[in-house]
């Protein structure tokens, strides 16, 4: 009798494993000026690690979707693409797009909803998750899906990156929402031979949206984009004013082919535009080379750059916290060190 019960238990366990559903992720593919955002490509890579099907979702105005769709169909890792177009989606506000996403998920096979940790997605995904009465996990840096238990385990930084939280979304959560830290995952590649199936989804018009798009202001620059640049030169409050910030950092950035960043203190002081802020409340970057010029290394700033492959710091204060994370540190007056470095780079 004992042996029979043991066999029965084994059979039931086997049946549970055999009938566990494979993951099916829906990835929000954000785009701007005819190109898919780099963060969305990283989100696609994260979705592939779930080990199941991956469907992309493209939302925008008709003229926007047409161009993006051709690019999305050639992304490695996608098994299908959904697209919805409407003039109302030309600037996809969360209040306008969320009804479409909610309707799509209410009658679909999707087990996960994935996006980059962008300003738009940080408003959209929690809104839809709340409507569906499920939680959302933000800014994840790794994930692992257990098909047998239908649970997904994530890691995400907390306390300005000084600790890592491990979060497990169990099988009781039917749809798992999460946003991805783009620096933690490589951008998905393209495959010119790929041509996945694309299906149109009827738009859901929102007649009286409480929010209206007024305008978009984008800082134009010939330099690499700060969020994806392989080299970044950042300046802090020690650069005194906006003119000094520019005259000191630009020659170095030009010599290195680098993007320019700034600490929050420099931005608050008016030395640099808010779009250049690196840190907990700014952009999170992880370039091959990060140069911190006149930056003390406040915990909020370190949270945005400490995953950089090589960190170089120049500061006249030998006790500055930035030296605790720097791979190469130079205790010197930046007004002497930086021009000398530029001259040597140009020699």
Image (cartoon, helix red, strand yellow):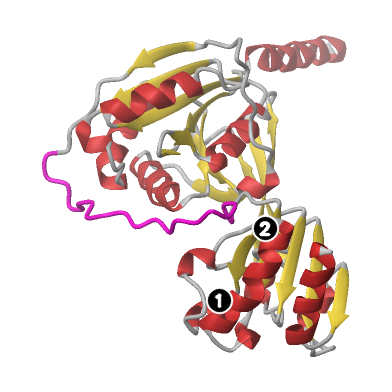
- Where residue 128 sits, quadrant-wise, is top left
Q: Is residue 335 left or right of residue 35?
A: right
Above or below for 255 versus 155: below
Q: Residue 198 magenta-drawn? A: no
- Where residue 91 sits, quadrant-wise, is top left
Residue 305 is situated, as x and y percent measured from the top left of the image, at: 69, 63
Residue found at x 70% / y 82%: 294
Above or below for 42 versus 331: above
Q: Residue furthest front?
A: 347
Q: Is residue 48 left or right of residue 78?
A: right
Mark closer to the chain start, 1 or 2? 2
Q: Quadrant of the C terminus?
A: bottom right
Residue found at x 18% / y 32%: 205
Above or below for 93 versus 329: above
User: Could you say whether the residue bearing mark 1 is in a helix, strand or loop?
Assistant: helix
Q: Quadrant of the N terminus?
A: top right
Residue 342 is situated, as x and y percent measured from the top left of the image, at: 77, 70
Residue beneath disc 2: 258
Classify 10 Å Cα crowding around label 1: few (below 14), some (14-19), many (20 and above). many
Magenta highlight range: 207-226
User: Could you say whether the residue bearing mark 2 is in a helix, strand or loop?
Assistant: loop
Residue 264: mark: 1
């Amino acid at each position: 009798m004992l042996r029979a019960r043991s066999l029965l238990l084994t059979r039931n366990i086997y049946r549970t494993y055999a009938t566990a559903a494979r993951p099916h992720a829906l990835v929000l593919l954000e785009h701007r000026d005819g190109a898919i955002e780099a963060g969305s490509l990283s989100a696609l890579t994260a979705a592939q690690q779930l080990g199941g099907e991956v469907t992309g979702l493209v939302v925008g105005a008709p003229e926007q979707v047409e161009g993006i769709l051709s690019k999305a169909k050639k992304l490695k890792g996608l098994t299908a693409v959904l697209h919805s177009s409407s003039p109302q989606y030309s600037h996809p506000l969360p209040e306008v797009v969320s009804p479409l996403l909610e309707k799509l998920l209410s009658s679909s096979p999707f087990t996960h909803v994935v996006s980059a940790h962008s300003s738009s997605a940080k408003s959209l995904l929690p809104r839809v998750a709340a409507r569906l009465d499920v939680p959302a996990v933000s800014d994840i840096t790794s994930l692992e899906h257990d098909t047998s238990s239908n649970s997904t385990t994530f890691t995400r930084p907390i306390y300005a990156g000084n600790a890592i939280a491990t979060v497990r979304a169990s099988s009781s959560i039917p749809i798992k929402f999460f946003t991805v830290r783009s620096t933690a995952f490589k951008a998905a590649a393209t495959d010119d031979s790929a041509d996945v199936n694309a299906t149109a989804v009827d738009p859901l018009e929102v007649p009286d949206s409480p929010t209206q798009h007024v305008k978009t202001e984008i800082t134009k620059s010939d330099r690499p984009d700060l969020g994806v640049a392989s080299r970044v030169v950042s300046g802090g409050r020690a650069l005194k004013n906006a003119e000094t910030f520019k005259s000191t950092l630009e020659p170095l950035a030009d010599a290195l082919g680098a993007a320019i960043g700034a600490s929050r203190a420099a931005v608050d002081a008016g030395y640099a535009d808010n779009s250049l802020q690196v840190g907990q409340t700014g952009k999170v970057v992880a370039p091959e080379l990060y140069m911190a010029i006149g930056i003390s290394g406040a915990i909020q700033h370190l949270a945005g750059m400490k995953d950089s492959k090589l960190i170089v710091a120049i500061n006249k204060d030998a006790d500055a916290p930035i030296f605790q994370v720097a791979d190469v540190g130079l205790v010197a007056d930046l007004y002497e060190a930086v021009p000398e470095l530029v001259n040597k780079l140009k020699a």
